[in-house]
Image (cartoon, rainbow, N blue to C red):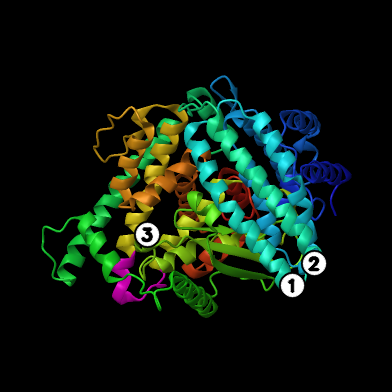
Amino acid sequence: MHSDYYRQANEKLLQLIRENVDLSVALGLPDHLGRLGDPSLAAKERELVRVRQLIEEIDDSRGEGFYEQLDLGLIKLYLQQWVFFDTLQLNGQLLRCQKPAGVDGISEGIFQLFVNDGRDAGARLADILSRLKMVPAYLKQELETLTTPVRRWRDIELDQAREIPELFQTVVTWARETGFDACDELATETERACSALQRYSETLAALQTTDAFSIGREQMEALLVIKRLGKTPEQMRRMAADYMTGIRTTLDELRVRLIAKYALDPATNIEQLHAFLLKRYSVQLEDGRLESVLDQYKAEKEKIERWNRDRGLFRIPDEQDMVIMRTPGFLEPVIPAGAVWTPLPLREGLRNSLVYLTLKDQELAEHTHLGIPMMMVHEGIPGHHLQFACASLQDSLIRRIFDANEHAEGWTTMLEDYMLDNGYVDESLIDEVRFVTKRDISRLVARVGIDLYFMSGDKSFLDIGLELDFDSPDPFKNAALLLKTATGFTDGRVQSELNWYSKEQGYPLSYLTGNRLVWEIKEDIVRANRCRLSQAELDREFHRIYLESGCMPVTTLREVYRHEGML
């Protein structure tokens, strides 16, 4: 039983969420499935008044016991982050006014209704039709909200907009196949929506733009504080540089062994060896079909589940499932290789995830027999899918929905090493998989430097130990040089990565920061071993608490482990 104060605070938080159309739908609530949100600044300001009011009301000291106080503190932090990101400034005005979001605003909910909704087709199509009717007015309001868009973000928006008509036409085809009784009206509204999207794109393309997208040092430091990462920007840069040194040492040791194994030229460098392994272990297409790559991922998913059943290191709930699919065209500009749409935390029923894989002829090197195992570990089980499926099953509202990037990415990147260390990959290929994994995980290091650089505009944050000259006035050229050198990614993937690095302040650096914070907790637990458990027992308990405690900053999670007697 919870205290009255705790219940009332949760009810007020839930009401705020219900009143926000986009957030409500994204979290899995059924309230606004047939509506688009209001992108106007006036609507946002009215909402912020209510958010700030609830912040003033929350007093975590009034919670009864550890977990009530924990949750009340997280509710307050969640609301404070809400205000921070909605009031973030760029070039002397709201960042929101320079970051076009019309495409996401009209497409995300429709795509969710199309592929990730368990109701019958008729109900889903009725909601899609209702949303399509609102598209012209929504895009008109979006244009009125924009002032001087960031050119890179404008171009991303235009790229995505070109792909949306294909999504809409696919929905019309689905409607005809299922016998939807308003097919003709749906087709008509689709044409109106596409026309509105064309007008939106033309007007957006004609707006004056800016290349300045750094939020500045002061706001960057405030962002790191409010995300409770526990490290200063300079500490993060040094952490990245130290980690890069360790990776380069490991890669060189593996390089020597693999050169001997494959009888390669002793002068073969890391980049050349990487290219050799990607080619040797590339996925062969069946009948030339790119979609046949998906079969390899599905087979890996089943392999992981069998492996875990044999060892029992992770508890997998019954009420979960995962669908693997090709990335839709309108999302390709921001999903360079793969991503996961995790279970909607407030939706009842089956906890379902969608794993997107971006498949392009010129970028097949992103999908190999060496990389696929770790991709599925990261995105599926025991990675993001399992993590958020478990979080959505617990009774704490805030720990279902709290958005802590370093908690999510720290878990999954920790697993990449953990699964290799615990024998998931066949011994005959362990060096090859570890090599490409460490080469790929160099992206985590590069992301720290690039994220800090993009936010602050300070090139010194790019100094992560690779001894490169960053002499271009174009921040994207400097960032591309670092990312390409660190990872060996294809040029296409480099640009896709930089697209979202630039738009998601503080997210890219959360990977390595989370990785280090999670490993620090785990290593401290091993050293303490207050319960005198075997290593396997200790691992199981560490995994159980991480997964069953729900979502929160990793610095807060440390207090949970202490409360549970493991520290």
Q: CA distance from mark 1 to mark 3?
A: 35 Å
Asked whether residue 221 is drawn in magenta, I would say: no
* Mark 2 or 3, closer to the camera: 2
Residue ID for mark 3: 363
Q: Earlier in the sequence, mark 1 or mark 3?
A: 1
Q: Residue at x 59, y 57 (%)?
A: 166
> From where the camera sits, is residue 402 visible?
no
**Dot 3 alpha-carbon crowd within 10 angstroms: few under 14, some 14 to 19, many 20 or more:** some
CB atoms of marks 1 and 2 within 8 Å: yes
- Residue 99's spot in the image, x, y percent? 57, 34
The answer to which of marks 2 and 3 sits earlier in the sequence is 2
CB within 8 Å, label 1 to label 3: no
Are the residues flagged by discs 2 and 3 in contact, CB closer than 8 Å?
no
Q: Amino acid at mark 1?
A: Thr
**Mark toward the viewer: 1 or 2:** 1
The numbered dot on residue 178 is 1
Magenta residue span: 422-433
Residue 303 lies, with reference to residue 74, above or below; the image says below
Query: Does the image show residue 43?
Result: yes
Q: What is the distance, in whole Å, between disc 2 and disc 3 at their CAs? A: 38 Å
Left-right relation of 87 to 127 = left
* Quarter containing the N terminus: bottom right
Q: Which dot, 1 or 3, sits closer to the camera?
A: 1
Residue 362 location (% of width, % of height) = 35, 59
Label 2, on which residue?
122
Mark 1 closeness class: few <14, some 14–19, many ≥20 residues within 10 Å: some
Q: Which residue is more in the foreground, 281 or 201?
A: 201
Q: Position of residue 394 (x, y in %)?
A: 72, 59
* Location of residue 417 by image quarter: bottom left
Q: Amino acid at mark 2?
A: Gly
